Image (tube, rainbow, N blue to C red):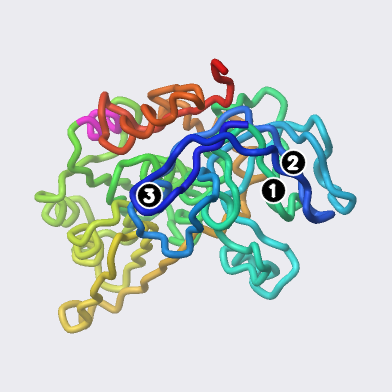
Amino acid sequence: MLAYTYMKQGQFALLEKPMPVLKDPKDALVRVTLGSICTSDLHIKHGSVPRAVPGITVGHEMVGIVEQVGAEVTTVKPGDRVTVNVETFCGECFFCRHGYVNNCEDLDGGWALGCRIDGGQTEYVRVPHADQGLNRIPDGVTDEQALFVGDILATGFWAARISEITPDDTVLLIGAGPTGICTLLCARLKHPRRLIVCEKSEERIRFVQTHYPEVLVTTPEQCQAFVKAHSAHGGADVVIEVAGADDTFRLAWECARPNAIVTVVALYDRPQVLPLPDMYGKNLTFKTGGVDGCDCAEILRLIAEGKIDTTPLITHRFPLNEIEEAYRIFENRLDGVIKVAVTPRNDK
């Protein structure tokens, strides 16, 4: 089968690899029917994910059909259409029992697929702990509707949940990339008084204005003044930082009112400095870290009910044998790209 593979820092390659096999009775084999490219894949390519293992098949955004299950798998069966969670988790350890599945103590726990073990930019993928990491797609929900459930949509849902958004809040969302848009969709479910998006890309500003006209939009240069003008207490009640740059990290806490919650979803290329003397007296609560992707069943229900729709994010589609071109467009933000859907069908 074809598999897009991490060779070394700065180099991916499309290789022929043998089909995976079950290694544990809790494993499942999934035939990938649709995948995507994530910014985290680019972080691996550029060496920003030290735990990534050269030689693994990359990719952690995918949906597919269960082909085979181990003897201890009970929640899915061959033939089921499923989403695949970005995280592998046992469901039994201290962290899993408390909902902190990103910190699962299992050897394969956390972000494993497409990072430490073979992922989904291929035709078949082995999924450990399948009872936890696979969710059946409801009838009537398409692959494209479900594509982002296991990663960026789970991230947006988690970010909105831990940010404790109330109907009285002004929420500032920094970054309108794919994860930012997913976070926007999930924050809207909390019905905040006001939702403001800060974005520098004109194309993405137009996207937000076209699809979510009720959302206020500003630019980084105007953000602090704009937020103060549109909030009751000198800043946003909740700030969610999804952009991942040095200036956006600072902007996040600068735009927060005293005693606000600042949720940092972004993955940064380098360490950030927390300038405590500058923010002294604001009494901010920071929430940070990787997504706890344990809400996928609820997200699928919301999609089936028409309350979440991420299909407008899919701006480009490519077969697996053209994935190099898909990466070129995605990495360089060409042709108005937001997300790319990759089908494993190819012209071999």
Q: Is residue 301 above or below residue 245?
A: above
As shown in the figure, which amino acid type bears the numbered disc 3?
Lys
Who comes first in sequence, dot 2 or dot 1? 2
| Extreme residue in the right direction | 71
The secondary element bearing badge 3 is classed as helix
Magenta span contains residue 335: no
As shown in the figure, which amino acid type bears the numbered disc 1?
Val
Q: Nearer the viewer, mark 3 or mark 2?
A: 3
Residue 29: give its label: 2
Who comes first in sequence, dot 3 or dot 2? 2
The secondary element bearing badge 1 is classed as strand
User: Residue 82: percent from the left, percent from the top?
Assistant: 69, 36
Q: Is residue 258 left or right of residue 314?
A: left
**Prevailing SS of the magenta stretch:** helix
The residue identified by callout 1 is 127
Q: Residue at x 50, y 38 (%)?
A: 4
Q: Are marks 3 and 2 in contact (CB under 8 Å)?
A: no
The residue nearer to you, when weighing 92 against 118, is: 118
- Identify the magenta region: 203-209
User: Residue 58: percent from the left, percent from the top?
Assistant: 51, 45
Q: Residue at x 33, y 41 (%)?
A: 177
Who comes first in sequence, dot 1 or dot 3? 3
Find the distance from the CA under tag 2 to the CA under tag 1: 6 Å
The residue identified by callout 3 is 45
Q: Is residue 339 above or below residue 165?
A: above
Find the distance from the CA under tag 1 to the CA under tag 3: 22 Å
